[in-house]
Image: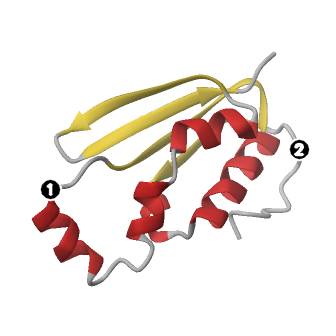
Amino acid sequence: NGENTGLPFSSFDLVSIAYVLHECPAKATVNLLKEAFRLLRPGGTIAITDNSELSPVLFTLMKSTEPFLDEYYLLDLEDAMRKAGFMHVETVLTDPRHRTVTGTVPH
């Protein structure tokens, strides 16, 4: 369970979450961010790669198989990361349909 891994506190330098968050309700995403923050050492980094903006046609097509897509796009991921405690939150488009968002745990 990524929301409560049971792994030791402050034991990793990097947490990577790839193509997962659009599959989750917003509450689970917030909990995943909190758990990642707990797991990372001071100065550690979270890297999240997932969907960026979609055209209305592609959104409609994906919505038929992605029940949490509305919640994914309504959640301000960068703000949720800051609220979880991450600093230096940055977003980079990795291709026209995907983004990578990073943040660090303060020292």
Secondary element at image label 2: loop
Image location (x, y in percent) of residue 39 = 78, 43
Asked whether residue 41 is in view, the answer is yes
Q: Residue at x 71, y 46 (%)?
A: 36
Which sits in the foreground, 29 or 8?
29
Q: Residue at x 46, y 56 (%)?
A: 74
User: Quarter-wise, where is residue 70 in the image?
Assistant: bottom left
Q: How many marks?
A: 2
Tell me the colour scheme of the image: secondary structure
Q: Residue at x 30, y 83 (%)?
A: 65
Image location (x, y in percent) of residue 107 = 81, 15
Please name the residue that numbered disc 1 is placed on: 55
Which sits in the foreground, 81 or 12?
81
Image location (x, y in percent) of residue 84 = 74, 40
Position above or below: 61 against 41: below
Secondary element at image label 1: loop
What is the three-letter code of the residue carrying label 2?
A: Phe
| Residue 80 appears left or right of 97 | right
Query: Which quarter of the rendered picture does the N terminus lie within?
Result: bottom right
Asked whether residue 19 is in view, the answer is no
- CA distance for labels 2 and 1: 40 Å
Image location (x, y in percent) of residue 2 = 68, 63
Q: Which mark is residue 9?
A: 2
Q: Residue furthest left?
A: 57
Mark 2 or mark 1, which is nearer to you?
A: 1
| Residue 92 appears left or right of 64 | right
Position above or below: 97 against 29: above
| Residue 7 appears left or right of 94 | right
